[in-house]
Image (cartoon, grey):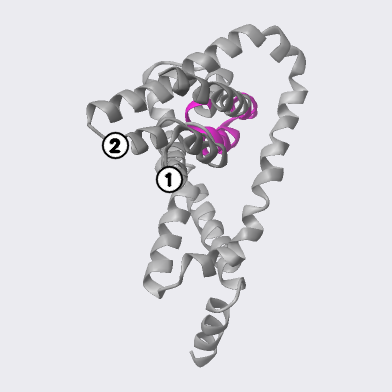
Amino acid sequence: MNEVVQLWVYLSATPLFGLTATLAVYVAASLLYERLGRAPWANPVLWSVVVLALLLRATGTAYETYFSGAQFIHFLLGPAVVALAWPLWQRRAELRARAGALLLAALAGGAAASGSAVVIGWALGLPREVIASLAPKSVTAPVAMGIAEQLGGIPALAAVFAVLTGLVGAITAKVLLDAARIRPPAVRGFALGTASHGVGAARALQVHPEAGAYAALGLGLQVLLAALLMPLIARLF
C-alpha cells in the first residue's frame, strides 16, 4: 500500500499524471464500451471526460498540471484529423460526382445547426457573447474558438459548446436517424459529421467505413464554410 501511495505522489507531481490517467481511463472506457455492445450512451469519450473531471476534482489536481502530460495526446489530434482524408481519397471519383449535392447539404446543415442555436439563444434572452459562442457549436473545437473570437464571443465557452455538441450527437444520432428512417451509411455519416464534427466522425467510423468517410467530409466542409461565412454574415447583421 505504501508503494502505491508513493507512486501516486510521484505521478501527480509530474507530466506523467496527465498522460497515464488519460490513457488508463480511456482504455477502461473503451473496454466497457465494447463489452456493452457499443451502446451509444456508453461512448468512451463521454465517460473519459466525466471520470477525468471527477478525478481532478477529487485529488485537487490543477488542470494545468494535468494538461502538461495530456498535451502529448492532444498533439495527436492534428495527425488524426489529417488521416481522415485517406477514406475520402479512396472515394474521390464518387465525391466528384456528388460535389454539388454535398455542398448544398453542407450549407443547409450548417445553417440549421448554427441558426437554430442562435435563434434559441436569442429567444431565451442570452447575452450576445454567449450567443456568439453558441453559433459555431457544430464546428470542431479549435476552429469554433477562432470563429467565436471573431464574432465577439468567448473562445473557451465556444470550445465547451462544441465538445458538448459532439458528445450529444454521438450519443443520440443512432436513435434520431433510425426514427427518421435514414438508412444509407453515407447519409448517416455525413449528417453526423455535419452536426457533431470530430466526435461524431469518430462514432461514425466505429459503425461503418462508408459512414466514417462521409462524416469526415461533413466535418471538413463545416470547418471551411463556417470559417469563411460566419464572420461575413455577422458583419451583415
Q: Is 211 inside the magenta-drawn segment?
A: yes
Q: Earlier in the sequence, mark 2 or mark 1?
A: 2
Q: Position of residue 116 (x, y in %)?
A: 35, 23
- The circle drawn on residue 160 is 1
Disc marking residue 127:
2
Q: Quadrant of residue 153?
A: top left
> Relative to 205, does residue 22 appear above or below in the rendering?
below
Residue found 72% across the figure and 38% down from its top:
83
Q: Distance between the Cα atoms at labels 2 and 1? A: 16 Å
Please provide percent x and percent y for residue 217: 63, 25
Q: Quadrant of residue 16?
A: bottom right
Q: Which residue type does callout 1 highlight?
A: Val
Secondary structure category for the residue under label 1:
helix
Kindly state the secondary structure of the residue where label 2 is placed: loop
Asked whether residue 118 is in view, the answer is yes
2 vs 1, front mark = 2
Q: Residues within 10 Å of mark 1 (few under 14, many from 20)?
A: some
Q: Which residues are magenta?
A: 194-216
Residue at horizontal 22%, vertical 31%?
124
Q: Would residue 104 be counted in the magenta stretch?
A: no
The residue at 54%/57% (across/down) is: 26
Task: Label the magenta part by its dominant secondary structure.
Answer: helix
Quadrant location of the C terminus in the rendered image? top left
Is residue 97 depicted above or below 7 in this figure? above
Query: For the point 48% across and 65% down, which residue is it?
Result: 63
Q: Position of residue 1 (x, y in %)?
A: 48, 89
The foreground one among 23 and 81 is 81
- Dividing the picture into quarters, in which one does residue 54 lie? bottom left
